[in-house]
Amino acid sequence: MKGLLLSKDELVKCENAIEESIVGVVEMSKLNGAIVALSGGIDSSLVATLASRVVDVYGLLLPDPATSDPQDMQDALDLAKSLGIDCEIIEIGKIVKAVYAARPKLGPKKCRLAYANVKPRVRMVMNYFASNLDGRIVLGTGNKTELLMGYFTKYGDGGVDMLPIGDLYKTRVRQMARHVGVPEHIIKKPPSAGLWKGQTDEAEMGIDYETLDKVLYGVFDLGLSCGEIQEETGVGEATFTRIMERVRDNEHKRNMPPIVDIGAVLEAPKLKRAL
């Protein structure tokens, strides 16, 4: 779709804006640098690459031996070494099992998603433990496609201080990754949150990122109608509706929790008495 792919000049502008923003948040927070959870995937590799150029980055590798791919961990270690990032590996399997043990009558077959979401929430805890110990902000690795679709765990991988690539669609993440030199074999990996063995983003969402990005970009950046999206992408009405419903249903993930406006309730009687 016209406009979705970035030009060389646009890539440079985005690259500079992201790096400057990371510096700005670290300086505003009066902290020492940033924590990045390295998964061996494209998103965390891109964030680590950009951040390591401008602030001191500490990498955390947080595998669960039950589901994590050893090659992903090796790729994360190799990337950290190439970027000059200090990092450590903390296996979270025992912590995850301890949480599971709190509800022994249930199980992953009955509550697969609830069980899977424990892992990113444990990782969030470890990220902030390191953050508090070292005086660093936590950089998230979510992209715009994931945020719009709600394809992240609330208070898990969504629990961060900043989302450097949160306004880049996955298509643009791939472009940016190549632009800054992320290894090609990482860029070409099937995207996966690693929630269970064999899990991939596209299989779980039921659509490939390339098509999904065209729909989302058409709606949110170009303001196209359902019919115009169908004409541009070939996506059927049922698929378009399903995507838009998912965006709407996950609005709560993108916003702070609502606060009941007690002030407004209490102010009304005061006004009456004043009159």
Image (cartoon, rainbow, N blue to C red):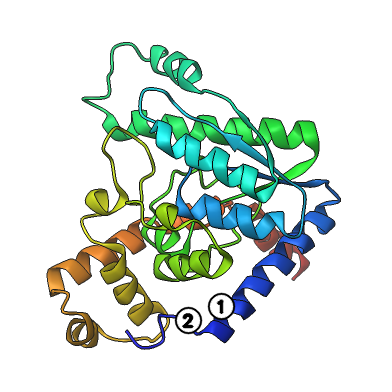
The kind of secondary structure element at disc 1 is helix
Q: How far apart are the two marked residues, 1 and 2, measured between alpha carbons? A: 6 Å
Task: Give the residue type at disc 1.
Answer: Leu
- Give percent across and percent down for residue 228: 23, 88
Disc 1 to disc 2: CB gap under 8 Å: yes
Q: In this view, does 237 lie to the left or right of 92?
A: left
Q: Confirm whether residue 132 shows in the render.
A: yes
Q: Where is residue 270 in the image (x, y as percent from the top left)?
A: 73, 60
Q: Position of residue 172 (x, y in %)?
A: 45, 71
Q: Front-most of 87 and 115?
A: 87
Under mark 2, the amino acid is Leu
**In which quadrant of the rendered image does the C terminus lie?**
bottom right
Q: Which of marks 1 and 2 is nearer the N terminus?
A: 2
Q: Name the residue carrying label 1.
A: 11
Left or right of residue 261, residue 7 in this image: left
Direction from residue 90 to residue 72 in the image, left or right? left
* Residue linked to disc 2: 6
